[in-house]
């Protein structure tokens, strides 16, 4: 560059510095970095010197380097643009009369070179900045990816575990391994809710602490205590810089720690601590990722608690059930014993009173006959009740032994037993039987057929008015023997026909009072029939048109 030699030797340097300083102050808002007000004066001095030096040596490279330096110092582009203006104004002012053109030209050149240096540096800085941001974003993304992968892996394993001990141990091992931490531990609140106990921890030191039942107070000086109290995370970048803590979750050589509360429904259940031997291993950016893990862990812990609770309740219920079953067994045993004890004398009573009623023990007058008939009827119905109770108890004890039985013979016997009763009530009782030799036998428990018949006939007698008729039919077909008891009594409505086989069910309370009974007869009949491999159905043409009960029992093969 060739510039005319300047004549002026004296420049008003303080004025130049003041003008530059003013510009710098006015443009501070465009600075790229923070410039302290106290630095402004210094920068203005440097800038004025640079211009004066250039005026003397015309060293272009030095001005370019100076522009770059100003950029690195953090000066904004507004400041650089305004500087040119200030220098031109300064050089063109009145005090420079005569030489102002030359000086303005110098200022122009100086400013152009300054801008070249400044914007080159600016461009380099922007490129550097872009590169820094790009790699920071990449690092963050990489970190997030790692965290998400680790979190989902940990969640997958832990949410499927129902044993609390296994769950916690697996969780700390996985967390320490996946994130390459030197230590991980889980504290859970104890029953007092005032302290948390270490429930799982990694490494030898962790195991030692577990063995001694390491506990920390909520709100105590330890990081875990603080996290439990505030229900938020605690991050320690360098434990050496922390005030000495008497009780601590740190294991030896730990330099940095992140503690996260384990929260379920807003309630704190415990805390997770992760620790590293290098300082500043964790940053606040890591917290959301770790909190996801802590939240999943908290709900897995809650599930495990619920499962343990359910298991405990199920055990209690099963114990209670066992107790009830034992009581039930004792009750059945008692019922069986009492029924046996009652049956023997009752059979004797019935035997003798029947002989009395038939006149076998001498003639009876009318009054005596009536009284003895009542005793016979009542004793028979009492015996029937006792037999029913006995059969029920036996059925529940599953005591069944089958033998080939001739239904026709049993029907004949039973019908003749009921004859006295039906005659007394003015009911016709008929049996329509296939001769025994043309009827196959059935494979059932013999007294069961007797109970079936006894109950169906008792009901038929009970629900049929005098002048009515009861017919018992027996026939064989399709590998089964059919037994039917039909009466001309009060009948059963269709909607009641299913329910009468339920235990203790009786069609109508008022009828029950009129007819008596316990409601166990038909349910016992159904159980007996089904347990012997048969089936039962009922039909009725309508009220007062009678009922028909049909039982089928499997015939003996061959
Ligand atoms: P119980 O006869 O002791 O009441 P059951 O179990 O033998 O008990 O019968 C249940 C109910 O079924 C009876 O209360 C009655 O309402 C109805 N039932 C049973 N057999 C007949 C029948 N032959 N005719 C009309 N209703 C009947």
Image (cartoon, grey):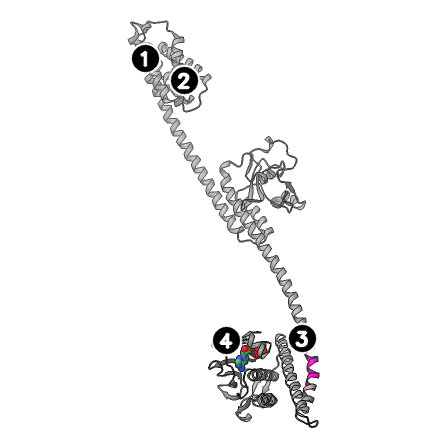
Mark 4 Cβ inside 8 Å of ligand 1? yes
Residue at (57% x, 33% y) in the render = 238
Kindly report the distance in space between the C-alpha atoms of the residues bearing marks 1 and 4.
Answer: 116 Å
Classed neighbour count for the residue bearing mark 2: other residues with Cα under 10 Å, few (<14), some (14–19), many (≥20): some
Q: How many marks?
A: 4
Kindly report the distance in space between the C-alpha atoms of the residues bearing marks 3 and 1.
Answer: 124 Å
**Is residue 368 visible from the viewing direction of this image?**
yes
Above or below, comparing residue 546 to residue 4 in the picture: below
Of the numbered discs 1 and 4, the one sitting upstream in the chain is 1
Q: Are marks 4 and 3 in contact (CB under 8 Å)?
A: no
In the image, is 461 to the left or to the right of 210? left
Where does label 1 land, which residue?
Answer: 88
Mark 1 Cβ inside 8 Å of ligand 1? no
Q: Are marks 2 and 3 in contact (CB under 8 Å)?
A: no
Kindly report the distance in space between the C-alpha atoms of the residues bearing marks 4 and 3.
Answer: 30 Å
Residue at (49% x, 40% y) in the render = 288
Kindly report the distance in space between the C-alpha atoms of the residues bearing marks 2 and 3.
Answer: 109 Å
Where does label 4 land, which residue?
Answer: 496
Question: Mark 4, mark 2: which one is toward the viewer?
Answer: 4
Q: Which picture quadrant has residue 408?
A: bottom right
Of the numbered discs 4 and 2, the one sitting upstream in the chain is 2
Classed neighbour count for the residue bearing mark 1: other residues with Cα under 10 Å, few (<14), some (14–19), many (≥20): many
Of the numbered discs 2 and 3, the one sitting upstream in the chain is 2
Does dot 1 land on a helix, a strand or a loop?
Answer: helix
Where does label 2 land, which residue?
Answer: 25
Kindly report the distance in space between the C-alpha atoms of the residues bearing marks 1 and 2.
Answer: 19 Å
Does dot 2 land on a helix, a strand or a loop?
Answer: helix
Position of residue 467 measured from the top left corner of the image (x, y, whole percent):
53, 88
Magenta part of the chain: 336-347
């Amino acid at each position: 560059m060739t510039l005319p030699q300047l004549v002026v030797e004296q420049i008003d340097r303080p004025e130049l510095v003041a003008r530059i300083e003013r510009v710098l102050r006015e443009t501070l808002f465009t600075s790229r970095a923070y410039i302290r007000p106290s630095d402004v004066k210094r920068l203005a001095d440097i800038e004025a010197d640079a211009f004066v030096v250039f005026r003397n040596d015309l060293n272009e490279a030095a001005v370019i380097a100076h522009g770059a330096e100003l950029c690195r110092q953090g000066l904004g582009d507004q400041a650089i643009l305004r500087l040119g203006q200030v220098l031109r104004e300064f050089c063109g002012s009145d005090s420079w009369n005569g030489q102002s053109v030359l000086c303005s030209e110098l200022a122009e050149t100086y400013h152009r070179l300054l801008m070249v240096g400044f914007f080159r540096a600016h461009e380099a800085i922007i490129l550097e900045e872009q590169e820094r941001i790009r790699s920071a974003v990449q690092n963050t993304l990489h970190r997030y990816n790692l965290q998400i992968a680790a979190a989902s892996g940990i969640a997958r394993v832990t949410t499927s575990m129902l044993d609390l001990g296994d769950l916690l141990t697996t969780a700390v091992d996985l967390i320490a391994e996946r994130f390459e931490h030197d230590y991980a531990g889980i504290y859970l609140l104890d029953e007092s809710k005032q302290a948390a106990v270490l429930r799982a921890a990694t490494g030898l030191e962790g195991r030692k602490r577990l063995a001694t039942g390491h506990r920390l107070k909520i709100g105590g000086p330890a990081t875990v205590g603080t996290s439990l109290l505030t229900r938020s995370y605690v991050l320690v970048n360098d434990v050496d810089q922390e005030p000495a803590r008497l009780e601590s979750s740190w294991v030896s050589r730990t330099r940095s720690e992140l503690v996260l509360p384990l929260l379920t429904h807003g309630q704190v259940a415990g805390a997770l601590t992760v620790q590293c031997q290098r300082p500043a291993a964790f940053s606040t950016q890591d917290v959301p990722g770790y909190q996801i893990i802590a939240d999943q862990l908290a709900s897995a812990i809650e599930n495990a608690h619920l499962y343990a609770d359910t298991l405990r309740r199920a055990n209690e219920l099963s114990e209670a059930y066992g107790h009830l079953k034992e009581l039930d067994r004792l009750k059945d045993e008692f019922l069986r014993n009492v029924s046996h004890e009652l049956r023997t004398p009752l059979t004797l009573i019935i035997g003798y009173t029947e002989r009395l009623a038939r006149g076998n023990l001498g003639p009876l007058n009318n009054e005596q006959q009536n009284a003895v008939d009542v005793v016979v009827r009542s004793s028979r119905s009492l015996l029937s009740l006792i037999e029913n109770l006995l059969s029920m108890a036996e059925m529940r004890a599953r005591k069944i032994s089958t033998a080939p039985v001739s239904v026709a013979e049993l029907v004949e016997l039973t019908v003749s037993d009921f004859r006295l009763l039906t005659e007394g009530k003015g009911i016709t009782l008929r049996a329509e039987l296939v001769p025994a030799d043309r009827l196959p036998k059935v494979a059932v428990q013999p007294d069961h057929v007797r109970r079936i018949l006894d109950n169906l006939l008792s009901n038929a007698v009970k629900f049929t008015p005098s002048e009515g008729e009861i017919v018992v039919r027996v026939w064989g077909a399709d590998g089964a023997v059919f037994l039917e008891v039909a009466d001309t009594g009060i009948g059963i409505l269709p909607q009641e026909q299913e329910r009468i086989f339920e235990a203790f069910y009786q069609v109508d309370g008022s009828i029950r009072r009129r007819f008596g009974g316990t409601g166990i007869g038909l349910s016992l009949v159904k159980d007996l029939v089904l347990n012997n491999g048969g089936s039962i159905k009922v039909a009725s043409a309508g009220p007062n048109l009678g009922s028909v009960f049909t039982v089928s029992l499997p015939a003996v093969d061959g």
